[in-house]
Image (spheres, grey):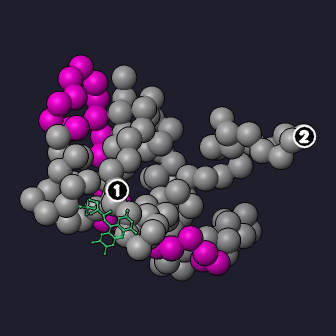
Amino acid sequence: MNVLVVKANNRPASQAVSSKMYETFIQNLEGVNVTTYDVFDEDMPYFGQELFNAFGKMQAKEELTDVEQRIVEAKQKAMDALQSADVVGFAFPLWNLTIPAKLQTFIDYVYAAGFTFKYNENGFKLY
Ligand SMILES: Cc1cc2nc3c(=O)[nH]c(=O)nc-3n(C[C@H](O)[C@H](O)[C@H](O)COP(=O)(O)O)c2cc1C
């Protein structure tokens, strides 16, 4: 079994509960393959116009700018990590009533029609 842990707190385990929970979880897993996707270690440009520009340019076989290239690669890396996993865990704090921005970027990268959900007659359905 392949377990992916998406870690979204760059505070040390000595100070942050969710980082400590992450470490305890990793240390106590047995008999599975564990991969960590640490959003604070990854180069993750924000989801936005650059990505849509990149899609258009790739279709037209035009050269991408640096940020367009980076976001395309980062998005693919996040999707590959998710696709390889049988089980996914998230280690994150709540900051100001929401999740860390880099975790939101991970979700933006992987939440895509035909990948994590599909449309049907009732709206949409998760895979
Ligand atoms: C700047 C900041 C903002 C926070 N905002 C919230 C919040 O909106 N809601 C909440 O339940 N906890 C909030 N917390 C508490 C953390 O979620 C809590 O400490 C939890 O242990 C996870 O954070 P940690 O893993 O960094 O310790 C906040 C903590 C900090 C440092």
Query: Tag 2: residue type?
Result: Glu
Q: Secondary structure at mark 1?
A: loop
Q: Which residue is mark 1?
A: 92
Q: Is label 1 within 8 A of ligand 1 (CB to nearest ligand atom)?
A: yes
Q: Residue at x 49, y 77 (%)?
A: 67
Instruction: State whether residue 22 appears in this view.
Output: yes
User: Is residue 99 shown left or right of residue 91?
Assistant: right
Of labels 1 and 2, earlier in sequence is 1
Q: Secondary structure at mark 2?
A: loop
Residue lying at the far top of the rendered structure:
31
Against 76, residue 27 (above or below) is: above
Per the rendered image, the range of residues in magenta is 25-50
The image quadrant of residue 5 is top left
User: Is residue 85 shown left or right of residue 14?
Assistant: right
Instruction: State whether residue 70 appears in this view.
Output: no
Residue lying at the far right of the rendered structure:
121
Residue 26 on the magenta span: yes
Q: Residue at x 74, y 39 (%)?
A: 125
Q: Residues within 10 Å of mark 1 (few under 14, many from 20)?
A: many
In this view, the mark in front (1 or 2): 1
* x and y, in percent, of residue 112 in the image: 65, 52
- Quarter of the image with the C terminus in it: top right
Q: Residues within 10 Å of mark 2 (few under 14, many from 20)?
A: few
Disc number at residue 49?
none
Query: Tag 1: residue type?
Result: Phe
Q: Which residue is mark 2?
A: 121
Residue 49 on the magenta span: yes
Against 28, residue 70 (above or below) is: below
User: Is residue 52 shown left or right of residue 14?
Assistant: right
Marks 1/2: CA distance?
Answer: 34 Å
* x and y, in percent, of residue 10 in the image: 24, 65
